[in-house]
Image: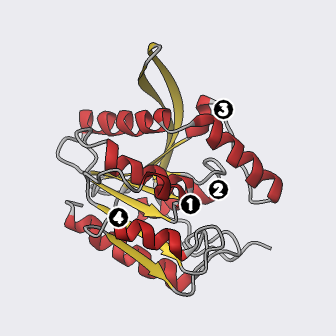
Amino acid sequence: MKAAMLWAMPESNTDHFSLKVPFHSSIGDTSFSVDVFEAKPKGETRGLLIVIQEIFGVNDHIRSVARHFADLGFTAWAPAFFDVIEPGIEMGYSAEELQRGRELVGKLGWDKPLATLAAAAGKWADSHRGKPVATIGYCWGGALSYLASTRLKGTGIKACVNYYGRQAYDFRHETVTLPLIMHYGEKDPFIPMDIVNAIKAEHEEIRVFTYPEAGHGFNRDSSHDYHKESADLAWARTESFLKENGF
């Protein structure tokens, strides 16, 4: 049985649009397109949050997160990163789907998702100049948000948020060039505290928060992994961080 939803369904405006992404590689220049789920606040926007999915695609949970952010006054865009491989991938949390998700992100790599983030920030700047942009990612998306903080300075992204991104560890030696905040659960079976402590040791300049009662996916209110107290505290810290960075 799914856990009760934390957030009531907000009265935000939602839509989809196709984002064209220029892509430069060693074999030449090309482009691709991904679908973006958009949730907009009723009033003036505080800025754009690019919501980066877990390995399960842009599913009901990610759309609910985007709607929640819109209810708080942000515009939220959730790109379907897997569209590069196969359009419309949307999964639940079974063992089989977990395995498929891992295979998909392995096949996708990092360069095209990073190009997607840069293209989204550029599109936002074209019509909302002066309104800030941040990335906020979960699990695989958390690691991608971390990479945005090390590789996407100058694209218009102003701040990055990483929720339990294990693969940030693999890139821990990269220099963080954008404001960054990170959240990890101390009971996460996939991310031992040794890994988190290694990230913290490498980046004493950033805030890495840990939550004693939380495991992996503690912000995902649609599953048994959800831990309300940790999720609420992490969001309070995240919102304060966003305000510090112009939102």
Residue type pointed to by label 1: Ser
Q: How is the image coloured?
A: secondary structure
Q: Residues within 10 Å of mark 2 (few under 14, many from 20)?
A: few
Where is mark 1, residue-wise? 64
Where is mark 3, residue-wise? 87
Q: Residue at x 58, y 68 (%)?
A: 191
Q: Residues within 10 Å of mark 3 (few under 14, many from 20)?
A: few
User: Which of label 2 and label 4 is nearer to you?
Assistant: 4
Q: Position of residue 198 (x, y in %)?
A: 44, 68
Q: In this view, does 211 lie above or below 99?
A: below
* The N terminus sits in image quarter: bottom right
Furthest residue to the top?
A: 28
Where is mark 4, residue-wise? 202
Picture quadrant of residue 241: bottom left
User: Which of label 1 and label 4 is nearer to you?
Assistant: 4
Q: How crowded is mark 4: few (under 14 residues within 10 Å), some or many (20 or more)?
A: some
**Mark 2 or mark 4: which comes first in sequence?**
2
Are the residues at dot 2 and dot 1 in contact (C-beta closer than 8 Å)?
yes
Where is mark 2, residue-wise? 60
Mark 1 to mark 4 CA distance (whole Å): 34 Å
Give the secondary structure at mark 4: helix
Furthest residue to the left?
A: 130
Are the residues at dot 4 and dot 3 in contact (C-beta closer than 8 Å)?
no
> 62 or 153, which lies in front?
153
User: Which of label 3 and label 1 is nearer to you?
Assistant: 3
Residue type pointed to by label 3: Pro
Give the secondary structure at mark 3: loop
Mark 2 to mark 1 CA distance (whole Å): 6 Å
Give the secondary structure at mark 1: helix
Mark 4 to mark 3 CA distance (whole Å): 37 Å
